[in-house]
């Protein structure tokens, strides 16, 4: 298993872990996307490894991650005005 180079949007890149966790919960991503985001951001799993784990294509994983991270960023702007 290789490590991913996680690239987060500016709204999220300097947040401490506890605030990222809060954004994940508050964004209400669903069970699979929540697992996907946590594995990608915190465990730094590569998208190819995540795809193999879920039986998806890497392209599908990428699409889910983009949507989930965008939703997290929108949530962060609402929760933490200093990051907006």
Image (cartoon, rainbow, N blue to C red):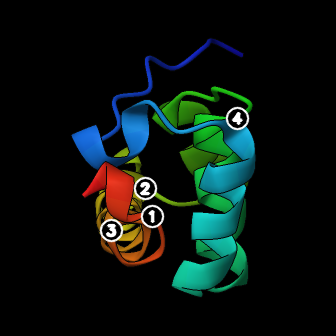
Residue 34 coordinates in the image, percent (x, y): 66, 69
- Describe the element under mark 2 as helix, strand or loop: helix
| Disc number placed over residue 80 in the picture, else none | 1
Identify the mark nearer the N-term, 4 or 1: 4
**What whole-number distance in Å separates the C-alpha atoms at marks 4 and 3?**
21 Å
Reading the image, the residue beneath label 2 is 61
For the C terminus, the image quarter is: bottom left
- Describe the element under mark 1 as helix, strand or loop: loop
**What whole-number distance in Å separates the C-alpha atoms at marks 2 and 4?**
16 Å
Q: Name the residue nearer the viewer: 59 or 10.
A: 10
Q: Can residue 25 be seen in this snapshot? A: yes
In the picture, residue 41 is in which quadrant?
Answer: top right
**What whole-number distance in Å separates the C-alpha atoms at marks 2 and 1?**
27 Å
- Describe the element under mark 3 as helix, strand or loop: helix
Contact (Cβ within 8 Å) of mark 3 with mark 1? yes
Residue 44 coordinates in the image, percent (x, y): 63, 26
Q: Name the residue nearer the viewer: 16 or 55.
A: 16
Reading the image, the residue beneath label 4 is 42
**What whole-number distance in Å separates the C-alpha atoms at marks 3 and 1?**
6 Å
Q: Can residue 59 be seen in this snapshot? A: no
Contact (Cβ within 8 Å) of mark 4 with mark 1? no
Identify the mark nearer the N-term, 2 or 3: 2
Camera-side mark, 2 or 3: 3
Q: Residue furthest front?
A: 82
């Amino acid at each position: 298993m290789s490590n991913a180079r996680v690239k987060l949007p500016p709204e999220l890149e300097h947040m401490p872990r506890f605030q990222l966790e809060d954004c994940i919960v508050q964004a209400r991503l669903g069970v699979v996307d929540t697992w996907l985001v946590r594995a990608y951001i915190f465990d730094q799993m590569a998208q190819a490894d995540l795809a193999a784990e879920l039986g998806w294509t890497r392209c599908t994983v990428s699409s889910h991650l983009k949507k989930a991270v965008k939703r997290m960023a929108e949530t962060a702007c609402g929760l933490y005005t200093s990051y907006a």
